[in-house]
Image (cartoon, helix red, strand yellow):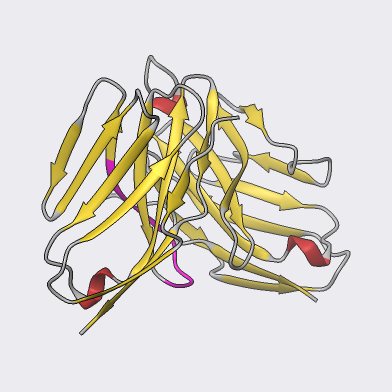
């Protein structure tokens, strides 16, 4: 089954630095989505990128998608302490349920 | 901004008891989902629901689970006889209708219900 796998598993950076997280998956997809989860809380949708798109921006977020390599990256620029959370990618394809990766735990230190 | 809501936020129950987790999806959405997340693990798909029936379910969603849309706004997950391993966060999600199918659209998640089985 298709599966998002994020790396690194954990990332610790200083406030103001950029954070890059990667996601790889196994099968063809229709779209890939990134979610954020604060500790013990719900999932917040960040951005959706479709298979015919290569890059998408939303505020300080930049997502890329390389379908030939079956990978995506999430870049958070000028990170803030409030960005501390776990970040998940989820892949979707018509007729199949979303599959979430194990997530990257991001710690932004003040 | 419309959002998915879930109640209760935390449910504690004894092993073997039945629990019902409630969700109110975003009002114009037609696809509904339940996911669970065992502490420290990844989010796992349980079931999707469309047009008053299950459209897809995972291996986790066995006979002890059931879903229902009892009225025009609520979407429930029932666990008939809870086990210790059912302890997890349960997330409800909903998505817009789409000609291309449910997995092609953004799913909006509720805040979750933390279920603790003792």
Quadrant location of the C terminus of chain A in the rendered image: bottom left
Q: Considering depth in this image, is A41 or A5 the residue closer to the camera? A: A5
Q: Nearer the viewer, residue B79 or B105?
A: B105
* Residue at screen point 29% across, 44% down: A73
Q: In this view, does A15 lie above or below A105?
A: below
Residue range highlighted in magenta = A39-47
- Is A65 in the magenta? no
Q: Which residue lies at the image location 44% right of the left edge and 50% below the top edge? A: A6
Return the x and y of residue B97 as percentages of the image width and height: 38, 25
Quadrant occupied by the N terminus of chain A? top right
Asked if residue A34 shows in the view, the reply is yes
Can you tell which quarter of the image residue B14 is in?
bottom right
Residue beneath the point at 74% across and 44% down: B60
Q: Nearer the viewer, residue A100 or B51?
A: A100
- The quadrant in which residue A13 appears is bottom left
Residue B28 visible from this viewpoint: no
Is residue A100 shown left or right of residue A50? right
What residue occupies the far front of the structure in this picture? A69
């Amino acid at each position: 089954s298709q599966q998002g796998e994020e790396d690194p598993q954990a990332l610790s950076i200083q406030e103001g630095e950029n954070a890059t997280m990667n996601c790889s998956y196994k099968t063809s997809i229709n779209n890939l989505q990134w979610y954020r989860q604060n500790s013990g809380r719900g999932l917040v949708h960040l951005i959706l990128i479709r298979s015919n798109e290569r890059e998408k921006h939303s505020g300080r977020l930049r997502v890329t998608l390389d379908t030939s390599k079956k990978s995506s990256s999430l870049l958070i620029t000028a990170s803030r302490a409030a960005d501390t959370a776990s970040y998940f990618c989820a892949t979707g394809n018509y007729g199949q349920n979303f599959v979430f990766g194990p997530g990257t735990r991001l710690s932004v230190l003040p | 901004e419309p959002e998915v809501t879930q109640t209760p936020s935390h449910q504690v129950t004894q092993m073997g008891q039945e629990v019902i987790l409630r969700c109110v999806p975003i009002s114009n959405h037609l696809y509904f989902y339940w996911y669970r997340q065992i502490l420290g693990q990844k989010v796992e798909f349980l079931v999707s629901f469309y047009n008053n029936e299950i459209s897809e379910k995972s291996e986790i969603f066995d006979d002890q689970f059931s879903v229902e849309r009892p009225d025009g706004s609520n979407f429930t997950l029932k666990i008939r006889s809870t086990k210790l391993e059912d302890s997890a966060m349960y997330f409800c999600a909903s998505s817009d209708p789409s000609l291309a199918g449910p997995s092609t659209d953004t799913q909006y998640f509720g805040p979750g219900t933390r279920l603790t089985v003792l």
